[in-house]
Image: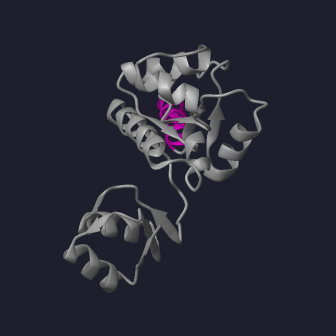
Amino acid sequence: MDVEALVKAIAAEVLKQVGEESEAPRVLIIGEKTCPKCRAAEKQLGKGHTFLYPDEDPGPGETLRRIVPYLSIRHMADMAAGRADGPLMEKVLAALLAGQPVEVVAYEYKRYADTAPEGLMRLFEGQEAALASFGLSPMDTTKRDTVRIRKPLVTEADVAGAGEQGATELRLPADAQVTPLAVESARDLGITLTRG
């Protein structure tokens, strides 16, 4: 038995395994490589990740994160109803059915938060909640100065959630009821409650 050859083989295997463990986290971006929103998602996640796309063979190893760069109103409504329109949304639905969480960088409906009627926004927020219960959740990496709540009753938990997002202002519907504890919590956190 050649001890030196055995030691070299063991050392090579250990180095190989250590190298595999330090590999960059893998992210499957469910979109087209040429899509500007996909490139923006890569930039937002930053360097230090290995980005894969649906048309690439991921090879061995588990993809740690699955990300949808942009979820349109139409796709959101379809997914909330358990339907997938097109091959990319089929990949999202297949991942969810397999119990794999999927993150969304941006929901289209949020672009209209300042102009859309309350009822319509509540509909979309309900669809977003349904999708979250399926395992599709927002990837929120930004802190916001202002958070808007569209609930008829604002509680201490709502104020605390805004505080966790770094908000200094919480915008409420004009007719919203605010609990006394929510008012006190806002004062303690330095959050201004604004109606309208």
Residue 9 visible in the current orientation: yes
**Residue 110: x %, y % from top left:** 56, 48
**Residue 140: x %, y % from top left:** 50, 53
Identify the colour scheme used. one colour
Q: Is residue 67 above or below residue 57?
A: below
- Toward which corner of the image does residue 126 lie, by quadrant? top left
Question: 89 left or right of 132?
Answer: right
Question: 1 left or right of 179?
Answer: right
Q: Is residue 1 above or below residue 166?
A: above
**Residue 164: x %, y % from top left:** 39, 67
Question: 173 left or right of 8?
Answer: left
Residue at x 42% of width, y 26% of height: 80
Q: Nearer the viewer, residue 29 or 166?
A: 166
- Part of the protein shown in magenta: 3-21
Question: 85 left or right of 3?
Answer: right
Q: Nearer the viewer, residue 74 or 28?
A: 74
Residue at x 47% of width, y 77% of height: 168
Residue at x 63% of width, y 39% of height: 50
Q: Is residue 64 magenta?
A: no
**Residue 178: x %, y % from top left:** 27, 70
- Toward which corner of the image does residue 99 lie, by quadrant? top left
